[in-house]
Image: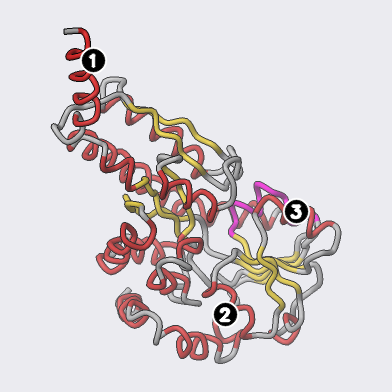
């Protein structure tokens, strides 16, 4: 009888998710951003929401600042189920999901409100459908950080001034293509290395959003900024496919709803605070900002980028057409 009861317990434990039983779960969530970042704050808030919706059965433990490795490493951990969830950049997913590159098209939109419309569109949502087969993950929702700006150690008066500069970029082929198009030398590196690399002269320039510029103080060593808004920068809330398969239908619905709530809140926060963050940057002594630098500054770079990437993803044309309606 003892052996029978032990065997029954094992079978019940293994099959409980497929039978629809709700189980306690504390999701380990990886991020590359520091605790002060909006993404991290919303992950913590998502844990509270999960607890409220599940009567305390579900929660999160966040691992910020790349504690679990870079985005590629965390993606591997998601594939094996060693990591439950992660908030990863859309840029980091482009190697596995080429269609995600369309979201990084230069000057797809030129303001953050329109960037939010892109990420909330049916076209963007469709791209998430490729994630399970390509990455072994389930994409719950998009969020974002601010629009990308150019910062450099030396003044920039024309696109020719960017030629030959060592530019830190987020490691992603569509982003690298953009910087190579005007002759820069892209230098992919983790976010945590950027400040020191600017300080010691390893890099000459960066592209970055207002939030990170303020959080990390990059203006200490890059005192010239172009307000270009040249690219939106998205995030995808991911859950391991292995972990997802073990959740009950009830818990899947709770996780999806909680993640969507905080993805949406993240987008809304960045949209509402973008202008005030720019004003804070304008108030920093010694930082020179050239505003309203549009695509014309970069010549025919949009056409050249599109020519290379249109053959790799049909979503580029679809997103350009959508953006033209805004």
Does 211 lie within the magenta span? yes
Whole-percent x and y of residue 69? 59, 47
Say above or below: 138 vs 104. Answer: above
The C terminus: image quadrant: bottom left
Residue at 40% of width from left, 33% of height from top? 27
Q: Which element type, helix, strand or loop, lies under badge 2?
A: helix
Q: From what the image shows, is residue 191 above or below residue 85?
A: below
Which residue is under mark 3? Answer: 195
Say which residue label 1 marks.
6
Identify the residue shown where x is 23% and y is 34%.
251
Give the foreground label among 2 and 1.
1
Q: Residue furthest top?
A: 1
Check if mark 2's residue and mark 3's residue have beta carbons within 8 Å: no
Q: CA distance from mark 2 to mark 3?
A: 23 Å
Q: CA distance from mark 2 to mark 1?
A: 58 Å
User: What span is in magenta?
Assistant: 209-220
How crowded pointer 1 is (Cα within 10 Å; few <14, some 14-19, many 20+) is rated as: few
- Residue at which label 2 appears: 177
């Amino acid at each position: 009888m003892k052996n029978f009861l032990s065997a029954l317990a094992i079978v019940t434990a293994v099959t409980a998710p497929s039978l629809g039983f709700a189980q306690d779960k504390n999701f380990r969530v990886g991020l590359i951003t520091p605790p002060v970042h909006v993404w991290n704050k919303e992950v913590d808030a998502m844990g509270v929401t999960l607890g409220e919706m599940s009567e305390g059965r579900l929660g999160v433990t966040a691992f910020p600042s790349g504690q679990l490795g870079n985005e590629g490493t965390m993606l591997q951990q998601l594939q094996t189920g060693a990591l439950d969830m992660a908030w990863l950049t859309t840029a980091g997913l482009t190697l596995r999901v080429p269609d995600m590159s369309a979201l990084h098209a230069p000057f797809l939109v030129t303001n953050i409100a329109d960037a939010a419309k892109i990420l909330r569109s049916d076209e963007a949502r469709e791209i998430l459908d490729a994630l399970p087969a390509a990455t072994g993950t389930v994409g719950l929702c998009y969020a974002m950080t601010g629009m990308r700006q150019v910062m450099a150690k030396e003044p920039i008066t024309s696109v020719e001034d960017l030629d030959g500069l060592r530019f830190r970029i987020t490691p992603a082929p569509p982003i690298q293509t953009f910087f190579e198009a005007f002759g820069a030398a892209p230098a992919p590196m983790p976010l945590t290395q950027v400040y020191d690399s600017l300080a010691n002269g390893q890099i000459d320039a960066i592209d970055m959003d207002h939030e990170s510029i303020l959080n990390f103080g990059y203006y200490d060593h890059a005192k010239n900024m172009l307000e270009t808004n040249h690219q939106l920068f998205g995030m995808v809330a991911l859950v391991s496919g292995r972990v997802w398969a073990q959740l009950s239908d009830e818990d899947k619905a709770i996780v999806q709803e909680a993640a969507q709530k905080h993805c949406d809140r993240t987008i809304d926060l960045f949209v509402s605070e973008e202008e005030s963050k720019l004003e804070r940057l304008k108030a920093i002594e010694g930082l020179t900002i050239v505003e309203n630098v549009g695509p014309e500054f970069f010549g025919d770079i949009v056409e050249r980028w599109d020519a290379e990437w249109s053959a790799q993803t049909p979503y580029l044309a679809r997103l350009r057409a959508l953006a033209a309606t805004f």
